[in-house]
Image: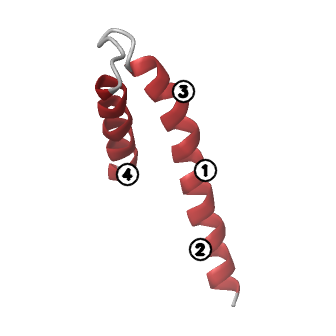
């Protein structure tokens, strides 16, 4: 669960750094962070399943 938080914080700081206004910065964060979090969790679950089958 912490990973999702850290991904969001990382992206929001990046968008602030490149000059996106504070009102608009959360929008690209959600657009990017949600799929990235999904893919990371999916990868972890698939890896766990593969390791348990061995």
Query: Compared with residue 17, is residue 41 higher up or lower down, i.e. above or below?
Result: below
If you read the primary sequence from the N terminus, does the residue marked by circle 2 or circle 3 appear first? Answer: 3
Image quarter for residue 41? bottom right
| Rendering quarter of residue 36 | top right
- Mark 2, secondary structure of its residue: helix
> Marks 3/4: CA distance?
16 Å
Q: Is residue 33 above or below residue 54?
A: above
Residue at 39% across / 11% down in the picture? 24
Residue 54 rendering spot, x and y as whole percentages: 69, 90
Disc 4 element: helix
Seen at 56% across and 64% down, the residue is: 44
- Where is mark 1, residue-wise? 39
User: Which residue is disc 3 drawn over?
Assistant: 31
What residue is disc 4 on? 3
Look at 59% across and 74% down and name the residue there. Answer: 48
Identify which residue, 52 or 24, lies in the foreground.
24
**Disc 1 from disc 3: Cα separation:** 13 Å
Q: Earlier in the sequence, mark 1 or mark 4?
A: 4
Q: Would you name the residue on which mark 2 appears?
A: 48
| Element under disc 1 | helix
């Amino acid at each position: 669960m912490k990973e999702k938080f850290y991904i969001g914080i990382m992206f929001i700081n990046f968008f602030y750094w490149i000059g996106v206004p504070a009102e608009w910065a959360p929008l690209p964060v959600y657009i990017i962070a949600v799929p990235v979090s999904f893919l990371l969790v999916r990868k972890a679950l698939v890896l766990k399943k593969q390791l348990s089958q061995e």
